[in-house]
Amino acid sequence: MIVSIASQKGGTGKTSSSISLSAGLAHKGKRVLLVDMEGYFELDSLVQLEKVLKEVQEYFNPSLELLGILFTMSDPTINTSTSLQLLRQAYTSKVLQTVIPRNVDLRDAHFNKQDIFSFSRNSKAAKAYDKLIREVFLTDQAAMKPFEDEVQPQL
């Protein structure tokens, strides 16, 4: 499985999400290869993403699919709430249920060169990424429980 995390601008949590998803899956015993290509591929909007997706499907890989749209850096402001509501209206079936909150622990984990699960496994951000992993990547019941029987990733 290949997962791409893209956004039309910087500072939206792409690298933090990539690291957190990879680390969370590794803690669940999954083998993960993370390639962060920040700056090599910028998108103007979700509309551009759809256009690129259709072109790749047409010319290179007809089975390529958009897994979902992840809303990150959520906070309790009206602007965030409105943005999420508009996104869900426009892309109903593709917007993931899990929302990643703005959380100082994500920034601090990044500065300390740690993933969020190693840095602060009980933070709101770690719990949100665990929920995302369970929502998207893990379907069997044994994998649904949070990090109770976790495997220590090899770095």
Image: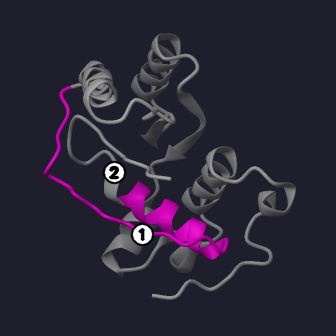
Residue 110 in which image quadrant: bottom left
Q: Is residue 119 above or below residue 133?
A: below
Segment colored magenta: 16-44
Residue at figure coordinates x 68%, y 82% from the top left:
151
Taking the image as shown, residue 95 lies to the left or right of residue 73, namely: right
Instruction: Say which element carries label 2.
Output: helix
Which one is nearer the viewer's eye here, 104 or 69?
Answer: 69
Residue at mark 2:
14
Residue 63 percent across, percent down from the top left: 46, 33
Say what amino acid the circle numbered 1 marks.
Answer: Leu
Residue 104 percent across, percent down from the top left: 43, 61
Residue at mark 1:
33
Dot 2 alpha-carbon crowd within 10 angstroms: few under 14, some 14 to 19, many 20 or more:
some
Q: Is residue 61 above or below residue 151?
A: above
Residue 38 lies within the magenta run: yes
Which one is nearer the viewer's eye here, 102 or 98?
Answer: 98
Distance, label 1 to label 2, CA atoms, is: 16 Å
Residue 106 percent across, percent down from the top left: 43, 63
Residue 114 percent across, percent down from the top left: 42, 79
Taking the image as shown, residue 134 lies to the left or right of residue 102, namely: right
Say what amino acid the circle numbered 2 marks.
Answer: Lys
Which is more foreground, mark 1 or mark 2? 1
Residue at figure coordinates x 29%, y 27% from the top left:
49
Residue at figure coordinates x 31%, y 64% from the top left:
35
Residue 121 lies within the magenta run: no
Point out the residue furthest to the right here.
141
Residue 2 numbered tag? none
